[in-house]
């Protein structure tokens, strides 16, 4: 029986193999250009070009590359930030969310700045 550490190591190894596989396919299919900023990559800089899954599902890897686009590290990060912001906007206004803290660390602060007589 595998230990939890061994299971985790195996899962990471499998994910890395899967990622290398679809990255190599995408680099063969598409020109080495970022799909957002149009910067070209070659040689050592090619490692800065990443595969973005348009539907954000890393298990959806059709061989025709229809779910992939090549993005540079910076544009890839921005794409995921934009996606998170869109999810938050779709969840509705933050006014209706419950506070994350059960106390306020600044509650007693106003009393410290009251003018002394």
Image: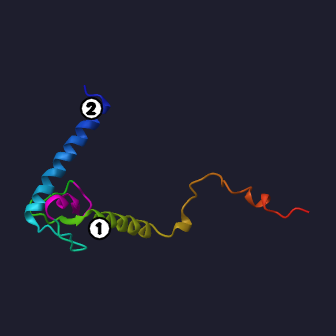
Looking at this view, is 65 or 90 the one in front? Answer: 65
Residue shown at 19%/43% (left/top)?
14
Residue shown at 38%/69% (left/top)?
86
Task: List x then y, in percent, for residue 7.
Answer: 27, 34
Answer yes or no: is residue 71 visible.
yes
Residue shown at 56%/68% (left/top)?
95
Snapshot quadrant of residue 113: bottom right
| Residue that lies at the very extreme toward the top in this rendered image | 1
Looking at this view, is 98 or 115 the one in front? Answer: 115
Question: What residue is disc 2 on?
Answer: 6
Horizontal side of 43 relative to 84 (left or right) equals left
Task: List x then y, in percent, for residue 29.
Answer: 8, 64
Answer yes or no: is residue 54 visible.
no
Give the numbered dot on residue 75. 1
As for residue 57 lying within the magenta part, the answer is yes
As for residue 51 lying within the magenta part, the answer is yes
Give the numbered dot on residue 107. none
- Dot 2 crowding, Cα within 10 Å, few <14, some 14–19, many 20+: few
* SS assignment at label 1: helix
Q: Which residues lie in the magenta part?
A: 42-58
Horizontal side of 110 relative to 6 (left or right) equals right
Horizontal side of 81 relative to 64 (left or right) equals right
Precedes in sequence: disc 1 or disc 2? 2
Q: Taking 73 as reference, is 1 above or below it?
A: above
Q: In the picture, which quadrant includes the N terminus?
A: top left
């Amino acid at each position: 029986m595998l230990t939890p550490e061994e299971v985790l190591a195996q899962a990471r190894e499998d994910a890395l193999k899967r990622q290398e596989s679809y990255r190599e396919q995408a680099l063969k299919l598409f020109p080495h250009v970022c799909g957002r900023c149009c910067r070209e990559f070659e040689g050592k800089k090619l490692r800065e070009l990443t595969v973005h899954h348009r539907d954000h599902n890393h298990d959806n890897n059709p061989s025709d590359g229809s779910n992939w686009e090549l993005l540079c590290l910076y544009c890839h990060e921005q794409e995921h930030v934009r996606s998170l912001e869109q999810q938050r906007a779709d969840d509705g206004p933050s006014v209706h969310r419950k506070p994350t803290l059960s106390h306020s660390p600044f509650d007693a602060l106003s009393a410290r700045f009251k003018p002394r007589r």
